Amino acid sequence: MPIQYQMAGNGTARFYKPLFDGPVFADVPGMATEFTTITGIVIPASWDTSGAVLGTAIVTFDEDHVAVADTGFGRDLIHHLRETVTVFGQIQVRGPSKTIHVQKFNVKGLKEAPNNQ
């Protein structure tokens, strides 16, 4: 069953959230925060001057791009580049940018990727 989403926000920040009564944790103009789960592929997002990966992002299967915050489990995702993961955490939306503060994640095998044939 596909996940259904609804538009949420306070007039200054808008984002899509799954249709359930999950909490929204911030009501700051320009920023919305909530807990959510996303699935996608881990990609490099920032590098040092020698080319080593410093930060990651997740590209979802509906082509959404979510930066991963440089904290705890988020740092661990560097070891899973180009792998499919399901991530649970607090997501922040500021304008068009999204960042997830990872609280837990699960690495999925290739056969578990959505729409994989």
Image (cartoon, rainbow, N blue to C red):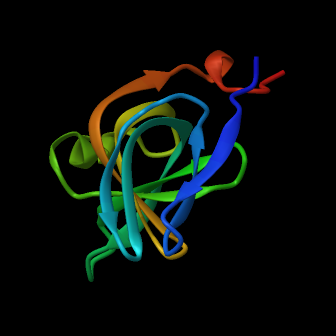
The quarter of the picture where residue 103 lies is top left
| Drawn side of residue 2 relative to residue 113, left or right | right
In this view, the residue farthest toward the bottom is 49
The percent coordinates of residue 28 (x first, y second) are 31, 70
Report the quarter where the C terminus lies. top right
In this view, the residue farthest toward the left is 72
The residue depicted at 51 percent of the width and 60 percent of the height is 9
The percent coordinates of residue 85 (x first, y second) are 48, 32
The residue depicted at 55 percent of the width and 73 percent of the height is 96
The quarter of the picture where residue 56 lies is bottom left
The percent coordinates of residue 71 (x first, y second) are 17, 51
Please name whichever residue, 28 or 79, is drawn nearer the observer in this view of the structure.
Answer: 28
| Drawn side of residue 22 relative to residue 109, left or right | left
The residue depicted at 42 percent of the width and 33 percent of the height is 22
Taking 107 as reference, is 94 above or below it? Answer: below
Report the quarter where the N terminus lies. top right
The residue depicted at 48 percent of the width and 30 percent of the height is 21
Number of numbered tags placed on the structure image: 0
Taking 40 as reference, is 21 above or below it? Answer: above
In this view, the residue farthest toward the front is 10
Please name whichever residue, 50 or 35, is drawn nearer the observer in this view of the structure.
Answer: 35
The percent coordinates of residue 98 (x first, y second) are 46, 62
